[in-house]
Image: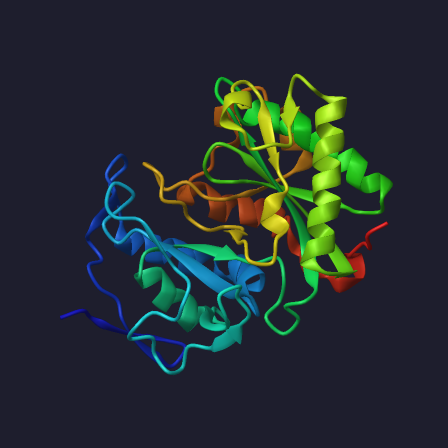
Amino acid sequence: MAPITQVEGRRLALSNLEKVLYPATGFTKGEVLHYYATVAEVLLPHLRDRAVSFLRYPDGPDGQVFFTKNVPPGTPDWVTTAEVPRVEGPSRMVLVQDLPSLMWSANLVTEFHTHQWLVDTPDEADRIVFDLDPGAPASIVQCCEVALWLRERLAQDGFEAYAKTSGSKGLHLLAAVRGASSERVSEYAKALAVEAEKAMPRLALHRMTRSLRPGKVFVDWSQNAARKTTATPYTLRARPEPAVSAPVTWEEVEECRKPARLDFHAVDIAPRVQDYGDLLAPLLDATEAGTLP
């Protein structure tokens, strides 16, 4: 029987704490829960008021990996849920609003993925996102080159851009936006991706066509669509090792010459938060948001 733990007055049954989820490093489920508890202060603001999709890997990344978008069976009644619009009709999804719901979610062994809009305003995007995905032999090093170009281009339109690793091979670029639908943001992001390809034809690509991908960086603008979700800042990823989608400084992006330079795992994040705070905090400040031209 799973031990019962009290988290801010909520009773949680946290199970299989000794189970190894990342065999490459021996990282256990208990360490996953400890990681999320440790980074809750910076993670929760990026989850709060956003419908969450869980990418679950209860037996580790080598086991079954599956998305859970609807409220999972057995969800406690104190976990906040909300009805959200979907193409196939409205559905009810989880909102991770506080530490107890974060720890309950983490006990399911999940990556956290969120939309680029708040649940109260599904018709208005509040973030622009570019997922920079390298095709081998390109790596995150080439993603950084593209990110620097996009940063400058976004600044021309009044947007301050911020970067985080995807926790996999690439880099995510984000900016706060206001007063626009997801459709409009998608159109704008696509236009910039096309511009990037024209400016760096040997490096950047705005189309997903697999045959064109080797050696280039796919500037994926499509995650701005209302139905799409992107890995939340600070989430663990279902990778061989406990990699994290970690915010990075622009100095780190500019100086990246080897992929290992921007490869961050769970043990790296608490010291980074202590040194930098939340590098993506400005995304949460509505006064910092730009408007589409």
Considering every residue shown, the one lying at the far left of the view is 1
Q: On the picture, is 27 further left or further right than 51?
A: left
Q: Can you tell which quarter of the image residue 70 is in?
A: bottom left
Q: Would you place residue 226 above or below residue 8 in this image?
A: above
Residue at 72% in and 21% down: 200
Of residue 140 and residue 13, the one placed in the foreground of this image is 140
- Residue 28, image x and y in percent? 26, 49
Residue at 77% in and 60% down: 178
Considering every residue shown, the one lying at the far front of the view is 88
Colour convention: rainbow
Q: Quadrant of the N terminus?
A: bottom left
Tell me if residue 34 can be seen: yes
Of residue 48 and residue 5, the one placed in the foreground of this image is 48
Residue at 51% in and 76% down: 83
Tell me if residue 149 can be seen: no
- Residue 135, image x and y in percent? 51, 24
- Residue 282, image x and y in percent? 71, 55
Q: On the picture, is 147 further left or further right than 104?
A: right
Residue at 42% in and 77% down: 79
- Residue 243, image x and y in percent? 41, 40
Q: How many marks?
A: 0
Of residue 167 and residue 123, the one placed in the foreground of this image is 123
Of residue 236 and residue 4, the one placed in the foreground of this image is 236
Q: Can you tell which quarter of the image residue 17 is in?
A: bottom left
